Image (cartoon, helix red, strand yellow):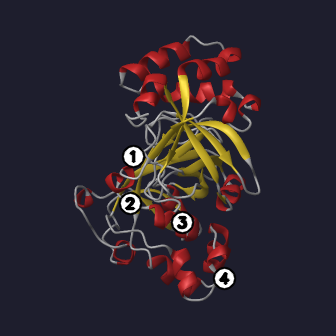
């Protein structure tokens, strides 16, 4: 899945939100709102949200969702707002933790099918002996022991080990070949070691303060300090393998947890303990780039835990990466649920 490891760059609020679903659900509060209580609802492009919803609603199995999907397919774009208002109710789901919105993106790396002096950092498939194991070799062992060499496990070779490290955090991306063509790679498994944040390690060493740490800051430091930087990357023993994704058109986004393409600025990763995959979610994100937008929960992530936690898919490439890397904002998210399902979540004594 695309959000396998991303977002774990040292944001304390993310770590604090990591709890088991059962622990979280015991303190969950549900309240039904009116659409008039959603800030900016009337001004949104509901047709764009409906188009994104249609991308995954056919995979929803419960009868109420299937009926809504059928209705959505028959809905003309100009009636999108009426569709959501007629068939859904906004539900505020709170677990006691403040809302946190971050961003993720699809990296684009430079690479080649064969190794050369420039392209010398391998993008590996998962070796068969690592499959099904709770834990395999560490990052250092995978890259220094020679266990991967000479086995044809390389999907491609890239020119930057730092960008490759962050490709593993994002979980998917594109590799631009010298002739201009693209290879798209998706999450293909991991070595089972826990993720250790190199951002937090830089803070622990006193090199940066927590509020200064971002993906761009980390990349810059590693490149300025190549020897120490290589060791810093080894601080994270987790290692992600990839698979080549051939069936997704280049014009579409990468595959999310629902095995469908995600849409820039309309798809989010959320915690399925609170937010059903495929459900519409109203996002009110504050910060430097405020958003008031209806999005669809189509992805998940190991760092995305809590009722008010979401990762917004920004897009592909460096510009999207810069935007995503600075997104750590408060606000609130409101889940849209089928009417009967929404009222069933309220306490019985109401």
Q: Which of the labelled discs sits on residue 273, or is there none?
A: 1
- Badge 2 element: loop
| Residue annotated with mark 2 | 19
User: Closer to us: mark 1 or mark 4?
Assistant: 1
Pointer 4 or 2: first along the chain:
2
Q: Is residue 1 left or right of residue 212?
A: left
| Residue annotated with mark 3 | 13
| Residue annotated with mark 4 | 224
- Residue 29 vs 248, above or below: the answer is below
Whole-percent x and y of residue 155? 44, 54
User: Closer to us: mark 4 or mark 2?
Assistant: 2
- Residue 292 vs 307, above or below: the answer is above
| Cα separation between marks 2 and 1 | 11 Å
Q: Mark 1–mark 4 contact, CB under 8 Å? A: no
What residue lies at 68% left-to-right and 26% top-to-bottom? 46
- Badge 1 element: loop
Whole-percent x and y of residue 11? 56, 68
Question: Does residue 58 appear anywhere in the picture?
Answer: no
């Amino acid at each position: 899945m695309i959000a396998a490891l991303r977002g774990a760059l040292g944001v304390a609020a993310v770590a604090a939100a990591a709890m088991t679903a059962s622990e979280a659900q015991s303190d969950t509060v549900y309240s039904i709102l009116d659409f008039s209580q959603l800030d900016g609802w009337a001004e949104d492009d509901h047709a764009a949200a409906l188009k994104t919803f249609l991308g995954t609603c056919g995979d929803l199995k419960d009868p109420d969702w299937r009926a809504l999907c059928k209705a959505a397919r028959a809905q003309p774009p100009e009636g999108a707002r009426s569709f959501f208002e007629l068939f859904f109710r906004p539900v505020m789901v709170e677990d006691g933790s403040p809302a946190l919105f971050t961003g993720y993106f699809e990296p684009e790396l430079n690479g080649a099918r064969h190794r050369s002096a420039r392209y010398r950092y391998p993008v590996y498939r998962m070796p068969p002996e690592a499959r099904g194991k709770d834990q395999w070799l560490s990052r250092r062992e995978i890259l220094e022991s020679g266990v991967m060499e000479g086995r044809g496990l390389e999907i491609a070779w890239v020119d930057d080990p730092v960008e490759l490290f962050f490709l593993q955090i994002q979980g998917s991306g594109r590799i631009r070949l010298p002739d201009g063509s693209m290879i798209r790679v998706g999450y293909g498994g991991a070595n089972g070691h826990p993720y250790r944040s190199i951002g937090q390690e830089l803070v622990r060493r006193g090199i940066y303060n927590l509020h200064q740490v971002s993906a761009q800051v980390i990349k810059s430091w590693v490149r300025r300090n190549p020897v120490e930087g290589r060791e810093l990357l080894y601080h994270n023993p987790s290692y992600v393998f990839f698979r080549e994704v051939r069936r997704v058109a280049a014009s579409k986004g990468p595959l999310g947890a629902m095995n469908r393409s995600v849409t820039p600025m309309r798809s989010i990763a959320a915690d399925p303990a609170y937010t059903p995959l495929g459900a519409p979610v109203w996002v009110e994100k504050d910060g430097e780039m405020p958003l008031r937008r209806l999005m669809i929960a189509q992805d998940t992530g190991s760092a995305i835990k809590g009722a008010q936690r979401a990762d917004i898919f920004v897009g592909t490439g460096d510009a999207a990466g810069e935007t995503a890397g600075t997104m750590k904002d408060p606000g609130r998210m409101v889940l849209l649920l089928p009417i009967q399902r929404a009222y069933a979540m309220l306490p019985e004594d109401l």
